[in-house]
Image: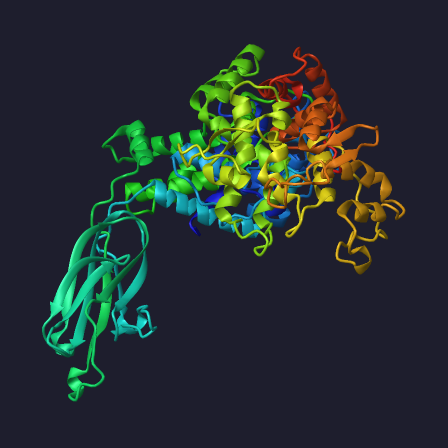
Amino acid sequence: MPRLIPFLTVFGLLPLSMAQEGQTTSLGEFIEQRCSKCHGVEDPEGDLNLVALENEGLGENRDKWLLVAEELSLQVMPPHPEPKPARSEYLAMLAILKDSLGDEVPELSTPVTHAPFSALRRRTVREIAGAILALTDIETPVDALPMEAGLHVYDVVGAGMTLDAAWLDRWLSLADSVSREAIRLPEPDRIPHVQASGRKLSSPRKSGGRLSTQGTAHLTHEFPRDGDYTLRGKAWAQQAGTRHAWVALTLDGKRIEELQITGEGPDSAITMTVHMRVTKGPHQVGVAFLNDYFQPKEEDLRERDRNVIVEQVSIDGPSDPQPPTSFQTELLLQAGEGDESQAQLGTAMTILADRAWQEAPRAADIQRLLELVQEEPSPQARLRLGLAAVLASPRFLLVGEVGEPGTPLSGPALATRLALFLWGSLPDEQLLQYARNDTLQETDVLEREVERMLQDPRARGLAAGFVPQWLQIVRLKNHEPSKELFPEYDAQLREAMLAEPVELFHSILQEGLPARDLVRADWTMINQQLAGHYGLPATGRSKETERYSLTETVRRGILGHGAILTASSDPGRTSPVLRGKWVLEALLGDAPPPPAPDTSPLDLSAPADRGLSMRERLKLHRTEPGCASCHVAMDPLGFALERFDAVGRTRVGKVDEQGTLPDGTQLDGPLGLSKMLTSDARFLPHLTRSLATYAVGRPLNSEDLDTLERAMKKVPEPDPPLRTLVRTIVLSDLFRRQPRDTPNQDQ
């Protein structure tokens, strides 16, 4: 990882204070976009060729660079009528120059008169994993990276992200790890050897390698990959009885070789050796004592007790040549098979950068990469470090672009936004081709691409990214129902619950069904474990997710999903208040205000409340000033879901599940709530706004909302399919252009 630090400095990863604001770009990009027209290669004005100077590096031509810094500080370059950079860009470039040239670089003068909006943000941890999978076909464990704060509900909103030194350090480590898995090197001359002496082995009586009864002394080892290994176990015996001691070499408790120890004492130790294929991951290698003997009444002390002492267990390997990954093979084929020259390496680096950055790298970029990796001992090692550097670049980590308010996004920026929204991943080659041909902004092309991408299996990324945040069930991962009351609730059931709303949303999207089916569908997508939890008859077909009918139940759409019902309950009981608040907030966009600071919390354990029903306790609570106005709207919605307990099971018998809304609407259980939400005029607009916020990665301002409303008025269907909402958002100016005003961060 430390090898990447010089690359980040040269490549223009700005001081973190700048990066946190999402206002970063490299010096090379700035010169190419803002200066090369006049100060490029051919006949540069003032005989100042900034492209050539930048390729030589900031350490050369100090006086010329100080002149450039002065012009930038005065904001006179580029000259009129060329568009002026944002103030943040000037600050960024001066910071880069100051890092290399020192305090002679002047500060920025008076602010520019306009400030183009920056849509730059860091990829989320989820998007990083999707991009790496698309690029290398490797599923990345991103647990080492802190998850986003999720401001404004959605993790894609830049204000909830960090790019500080700690985060960046973890990311560099992960980029290095990904490159090591994606690019395999020839095996080293020395085969790895791991050895543990008897006293360091684990055994049933915690006696190390001394086995006085039948059992195993073992070593737990993390095998780095599938491969050929040599396993050894050395042991000797204290004999007793008429038979010799028998031992076995074991792998994960299974005997792989058995041997008799015929002698006695350390000098008669035997070694068992097995050459075998072992899979990647943690395994236990040990020596087992198979035939214990103990006769405490035997007069001859030497004949009373048979024991085995394990001296050591060792592992050598992997010893077989490691084949290249499919990603590595494909990359080298495209770069020129069999040619390990600098030219092939440069071609491979160009392919990598083009895929990861979604834009063609400049010759200077590739030259920097080649300079970074030149000290590596082999072509494969140079390629590995090059991949890590490409992933560490701001061009991979940051998405979006800086632009004038209201202007169309560039083709690559639009392609990236579309792929992140629908797939949570990188654009594929077809999408990039339209982007590079400047045809993606054409409405018919964009509409066709939306339909194509929604039919792709990667479209599950939209449901997986959006639904848990929209429905606020991310919190379920930290919610623990009472083990005493709900012993059947475990990690597997929780994961099945979390998958259900994602699968329902994805199915409705794929099948072109109405968006309102999210709250009225009489079917769901679950596995057998969750079906049993709901009391549904087992199909006997599969343990995988499949469609179950709910027509004979009161469950409808997401209202009957265990994830939502559990996350909106207290650990030991249901909470009509939490459930009602969730309906208002997540489904209707009508969140109640927080309680006043002097409001007493609802304490269901208070002695004065004992013996009262839940409804009576809430009624008593509403007598406090400032409580009634919110609870009169929340509580009836929550009581409508009282048919389900605190882990989402259906309650039998009499349940208090009726309520009256402020407008007089009567609710009778989950079916009544489903009917009410299906007809509520707030549901579809709020769902659309939520999708749009997730799509563009920012809170919507007033003009965004007006744009979205105008687009939705053109939708002809009274009960529009969910995919129509998605398509309408993508085709709107909200998605295809920069915002005209800075989004309201307090929204």
Looking at the picture, the colour scheme in use is: rainbow
Look at 77% across and 39% down and name the residue there.
635
Q: Position of residue 336 (x, y in %)?
A: 27, 28
Residue at the far bottom in the pictured view? 299
Look at 64% across and 28% down and name the residue there.
519
Kindly tell me whether residue 487 is visible in this rendering. Answer: yes
Closer-to-camera residue (72/87): 87
Compared to residue 262, the image places residue 538 above or below, namely: above
Compared to residue 551, the image places residue 236 above or below, namely: below
Kindly tell me whether residue 5 is visible in this rendering. Answer: no
Quarter of the image for the C terminus: give it. Answer: top right
Look at 56% across and 33% down and name the residue there.
501
Compared to residue 426, the image places residue 245 above or below, namely: below
Q: Write down the quadrant of residue 211 in the picture.
A: bottom left
Q: Write down the quadrant of residue 550 in the picture.
A: top right
Residue at the far front in the pictured view? 653
Q: Position of residue 308 (x, y in %)?
A: 21, 74
Q: Position of residue 324 (x, y in %)?
A: 27, 39
Q: Write down the quadrant of residue 300 in the picture.
A: bottom left
